[in-house]
Every structure is written in C-alpha cells, then in structure tokens.
Image: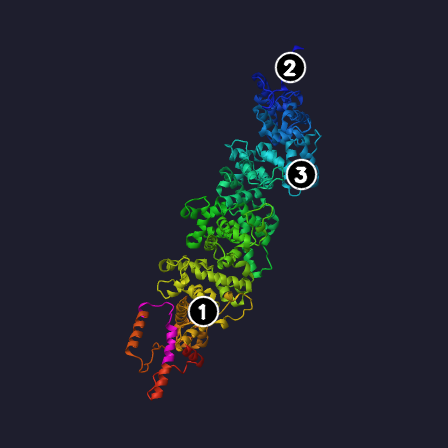
Amino acid sequence: MPRAKVSKRPAQQEATAAAPTFLPPLRHRQKSLAVREFLGRSRGSQPLYKQPACRDSVRLHCSQAVRRNNFAVLACLQRSQAVAESLPEACQAAIWQLKFNLTHNEDLRRIKACGREPPRSVLRISCLIEHRANVSERACRSYLRRLEPLVFADYRLVERFIGACKADVVRTGCGRLEPRTNAVSASLPTSQGRTVACLGQKVAVVSHQCRLQLLRLAELQTSDYHNDRPLFYACRDDRERLCGAVSSGGGRVLACLNRQREAARPACQVELARVRGLAALDFAVYRRFADACGADLRRLGCVAPGGEPAGSAAALLCLESSLISKGTTAVTAACQSRMMDVRSDFISDPQLLPGLASGCSRELQRCRADHTAEQGLLHCIMRQLRAARDAQLTDGPGRNSTSACERAVDRVLRVAMPTRDLRVDPVVMSGCAGEVRLHCSAPGTASVYTCLKSRLAAQPETVSVACSNRLAELVYFENRDFRLNARLFKACRAVAAARCGAGETWWSGARDRAAAVALGATFNCLYGLMIRNETSVACSAQLAKSLRERADRARLDARLFAPCLRDLSRLCLHSRRPGDEFACLQDNLSLLDRTCARVVRQVSERVDSDIELSPDLLFVHSCQPFVRKFCDRVQGQVGLDKTVMSCLIQLKAHPKMDPRCRAGVEHHQLVSLRDYHISRDFASACGDDIRRLCSAAEGADAAGEPSSRRNIDKTVVVRCLATAARDDVLKSRPQRLSRKCQGQLSLELLQRHRLPSLDPRLAKSCELELRTLCPLARMAADGSPAFGPPPPPMPPRSPPTAAPRSSSRTRHCRKQKEAADKRDAAAPDPSNQGAVTRCLRDIVASEDDADQAAAVGRPAPPSKSSVLRGQCRSYLRSL
C-alpha cells in the first residue's frame, strides 16, 4: 500500500502540473515532475519498452538512451518506412493506444482557446496545435510540439479531416481512412501518408470542405518538415545531403529543399511539388512567408479574418500593389525578402498558378518533350508562343490562337514580376550573366532588367543572342501589359483607368478590371493619347522610354502586332530584316485596314518627332552617332521648332551620314508624302494655312475622321501652297502664307529638287528620261535601283552640259552658277541629290536655247529634245 500511495503522487500532481500561466502557479518541485510527465509519460500508460508487444522492436531499433521516453521511442519507430512497416500488429495496436492517451491528456482541457471542443474529442488536439503559439508555459509548448509528429503520422487523430475527406478518399481512389480501426494497415504512417498525399495531388477535384481541411493540415505540417511524413520519408537523405546544416522548425528545412530541388531525388521532387501546389492555394503553407508577411497581409486587407484561405498568388499581387502605389515602406523588409522566394517558385514552376495548365496545354505538351532545367518551363512556353505568333503571320489570325495561354503566362509574370527584379528568373540571369557583369554593375537589383533592355536597344552588338532572346520573351509581355512595368504603371495609371478601361489599382481581389482588357489594348490606348498630347508629361516620358527599350520587330511591338496582324500576314510575309515589317506597312499604307493604317500613321508621326521611337532599330542605330554629333541640340527637347528628323533631312547630303541612315530618312520622306500630318514640322507650321487656303485639297474623307486628322496627300498640299505663294508674287499682293509656313515650304521644294522621288508627278512624267538621259538617278542612297532596272549599256559620252544661254544671261549669274558647282564638287553628295533635277532642267534649257536660236536665225546648239517626251517637258516647264 505505501508503494501504491507513492505511485499516486505524480498522478495527483498531474492535474495541476505544467499548466500555462493562466493556471495556478506551482512550486519548483512540482514543475520538475510536470516536465518529466510532459516529456513522455502519460497517466495510465506504461512505457513502450516495457510492453511485451513492443519490447523486442524497441530493443532492436532504438538505443537504450531513449527507451524511457515514449516520445523518443515513437520517433525512433517511425523514423523510416522500413522500420514502421516491420512492426508487429500487436505493437501497432499498443502504439495507437499510446497516441490516443497522449492526445487526450485531461490537462489539455484547461487551454481556454479550445474550451468549446468536447472533452474527449480528438478535435481538441488539432485546435491545441493550432494555438500552440498562444501558450506561454514552456513545458506545455514543448509537449504540444512533441505531439505534432504523432498527430500528423496518424490521421485518425484528426477527426475533422477524416469526416470531411472520407468520401473524397473513396471517390478519388486514394485508399482508405478508417477512424475506429486498430488494423496494422490503418496504423502505418506510411499508408496514411500516401492517402493524404494522394488527396493533396488531386486537391483540384476534391470537395470544398475536404480542400479546406487539406490546406489547414498543410499549414500546420509545414512548420516542421518532420510533421509531413511522406515528405519526411522521401526527402530524408536529401535533407542530410543538401540541408544538413539547417535546423528544423519554422519551415527552414522545407525552404532549403525547395531552393535546391533540382539536385534532390525524383521522389523528393514529387513531394516538394505537392507541397508547393498546396501553397499556391493557401499562402500560409509557405510557413516562412506566412510568418514574415502575415501581419502585412492583415493590415493591408489582403486576407479576411476567418475567411477562405488566400492563395499565394493573390497574396503576392496584393502586396505588390501596395509596394507600387505606396512605396517600399508599405511592406516590411522581412516580408519583401520572403516574397522573392515565392516569386521564384512561380517562375520555376508556373503550373502552380491555376489556369496555366488548361490554357497552355498544347505548349506544355511540347515543352515536356524537350524541357531541360537550363531552359526553364516558363521560357519554353514563351518560345512556343513566339513560334505560334510567327505561324499567325503565315496562317492568318484565325488559326493558332494563343490568347488563353498568353493571358495565363501574363498572370504568372505579374505574380512573379521578373521585370521588377531579375533574381527571381534564373533563366534570364544565366543567359545574361556576362552582360550583367560587364554592363549592369548592380546585379540582382531592380535596375538590372532596365539596364539590359536599354543596352539591347542602344548597343545590340554588345548583347549576346542568348541574352537578347530571353529578354525579348519578357519584353513582349511587358509591352502588352503595362502593369508589368512598375514605372509606367505608376505614371499612367490614372489616365489608363479614366480613358482606357484599366484598373485604377495595380490589382484588386474583387475585380481586376485590367485583366479583362485584351493584352496590348491599354498600351495602345495610352500611346494614342500620347500622340494627341492628352497624357501627363510623366506618363508620356515613361511611354517613350518604354518604346525605346522594346524589341525591334513589329510582331514584338504592341503598337503594331494586334491591329496589323491581318495586314502583316497578307502583305509583309517577305519581310525578314528587323524593321522591314514596319517599312512594308508604311509602303502599303493605302492598302491597309483602317485601324492598322491609323496606327501606322500615328507611329510614323511620332518617329518624325523622335527617331528613337521607330520600330526599325537598324535605322535608329545607324543614325544615332550622326544625331549625337550634329543634331544633339534638338534631340529629345520639347518646344523647339526643329525636330531630329528635320535636322537629318537638311543634313542628308553630309558625307559623314551613314548610308543606311540616309536611306531611312529618304524612306520616311516618301512615306510622309501619303499624309502631310506625318511631317510634324510641316504640319505644325502650315496647318492653319492649309485649312485656310487649301480646303479643296482636304476634301471629304471616307473614314469620317476630323479634317485635322484626315489622310491628305502632301504633294497636293505643297502644290496648293506653292501656287498660292506664286500668285501672290505675280499679283504684287501681300503673302497670305505665314512666315513659318513660307520657311517650311521652301525646305519642301528644296528637297523635291534634290530627290526627284519626292515629286511623284516628276517621277511618273519623266521616268524614261530619268533612266536614259540622267543615269545618276538610277541609284538610291542605299545602292538599290530607284526607278526600275538599269538601262542597257550605252556608249560613253560626256555628261550633259548646259548650252550657251541667251544673251540676257549676265556675267555675274554665270559666276554664281560656277561657284555653286564648285561647292557641290567640294562636298560630294553620296545620293546625288540635286543632280537629277539639274540634269533634266539643263535639257529643257538647251531646248529653249535652240528655240531662241531658230527664232533669230542662228545655228541651233546640240540638243536632246529628240528623246525628251512632251509630258516630261511640259511638267518641267511648269516647275
């Protein structure tokens, strides 16, 4: 009896021992007894090593140092799948009974947060683990921490989970969950773990209530990877090999394994993917992210207390919205650091985002066939989309539609935001490592992406093909979704919301309005507003900067691809050199669809103001050195009368101009003949004069556009203004043209004199003469035929010289002409500007001299009138 009395003493103390601080305080001796009790000896439970059913198994598998601690013995017997499956059935039953007793300790009823649960219900233990952080007594917290692996190794102890998922287990074929059986198959943690892991892999098809329980269970498990038995068994060796120096708890081991998952074994990779899939549905499964960002998410209203679990994508978008709209102080530094980890997961495994698997099923199927770790699945999908866009140019927009997949990829990029910080995208960082090291001296910062884009735009020869291809994949989407450019969004969000149907906030959980807008539509709308000067200075500056950093093909230019897809596939399939597609659209302006034609005119107008906005980067790059040296005063300055293009036009004959630049300038001049609005200087200086004096030239437009925006032939307008100026001189009346317009008109007439192709009537009326009598006109600035194929070889002859003029020509006039000819010879004109018109006018002058000589009876000088056709002669005399 005395022995029995002594044996009751710990049991009597157990009722009040080791309680949290809200229980009556205990003396030091009582606390010591309580700690021993909490660390493995439960009332009425005999140690496992003394129970006959388990004695031999404990001696076989567990060291003598741990045999007296039931928690340590349980951990020992469940440390591996082989050991757990080798235990006899009787020992499994004893283990189940011990687990039940440990999780139904009467003292656990005193924790008030779980007081609503029935006293003997296993619901209480889930509640206790969930509220472990609220327990202030160290011994109690230690006890609950040791209970966690026991509970998560036997899901019969989580009654709510079993009730919510039992039907789903049967329906999905994931095994069995029997809450009341003591069978060995039900007690084995490996068997139960496989069942729950199976449900986790099929979480998309399980019932709503079961999904909630799976997510809640995953939240609790990820605090310590030991709690997820399938993960623990699959990754145990990898944990020792890759993360041996990382202590468990707080999600640290799981985070380490995720970072090095490419080096883990396939079985471990499968389990890590399962956990990431659950984390995509519930951000709290990312334990370190939840711990660092939970307070910010609640403060910013990103999660509703007691509401449905928020996915990690939604949590990231909400935090990113606050960072963009309120600045970096809106989110703590610790949270921003953890955001990087989650972003990296979405880049490396884009299928975590719901919708990508279904939207990109075709692309995923192709990528799985040749996917490698170096390529990256997301970038492989981007390449597939790029190939599909090329096919659209061939097959037309009705086939190979990629809109659903493009929207899914756009959402992945908006969640991961590699355009904000390239460190989350290892594919680009690897492909551009050399460029980052040499040219972008702050690796990993938000400026690296902008630095690489600017480098690609300004000096493409310094960027490798691999790097430029990877950047182009990101630039394509950035140019279509202005939210991917944080600077652009911040500067333009107000006008985008008011005028373009975009969301006023970067992201809204209730209704993301911008997501419903077709990719590229917001950007094109903003560009149109910029053309009409209806955006703020800051917004226009960011739009222009974004355009200068874009890729160099029309299919990658958001301004042109969507509106002009049909015309590109119909008219410009032959275009191969970067920039040819835009030039092709300009050359076929009259044949384009109305929407495409309007966009091409708008882009051409903008290029006239700033050549760096041209989609033809070869033209831009060839002109930049000359612009920096000779036109830097007007480059990028607002309010000056002269644009960069007008500077290039006036200096086009300069010997230091790159022939490719000269060819681009002349092509722009030819395009501007289709619509005088394209020449910004001319339209600005003469717009009022045109409306006042040339109303007939404006005419009615079938498109119904305002008269100030109609497509009006520039040659007709120039002829009208020149006629008005001539009539004022002949009639000795004041000039009706404004002084600014007179200057621009003189420049236009001078350019027509220098380049006959700028005068379509001259080129048409005198085509034969230009080819036979003035062969210098055959070659344009780029060396290509300007007026058709070269004529057949002709016998050598001296260049045409002007016949002696009438006696009215004064000696002073002849000296002025000789001086002008010497100046032309001293500064050679590579494109022979002016030589053609001079040649033809000399022929006409010789004809006039012959007529005058015949009239006074003198011998006629040599003349080519026999080959000068009447229509050419008539037009030349009208000039």
Mark 3: amino acid: Cys
Disc on the earlier residue, 3 or 2: 2
Image: 277 above or below 530: above
Report whether residue 477 is seen: no
**CA separation in Å, label 3 and label 2:** 45 Å
Type of secondary structure dominating the magenta stretch: helix
Mark 2, other Cα within 10 Å: few <14 / some 14–19 / many ≥20: few
- Magenta segment boundaries in residue numbering: 825-845
Q: Toward which corner of the image does residue 875 lie, by quadrant?
A: bottom left
Disc on the earlier residue, 1 or 2: 2
Q: Is residue 500 left or right of residue 436?
A: right
Q: Nearer the viewer, residue 876 or 298?
A: 298
| Whether label 1 touches label 2, CB < 8 Å | no
Mark 1, other Cα within 10 Å: few <14 / some 14–19 / many ≥20: some
- Residue 590 part of the magenta-drawn span: no
Report whether residue 437 is seen: yes
Q: Which residue is mark 3?
A: 210
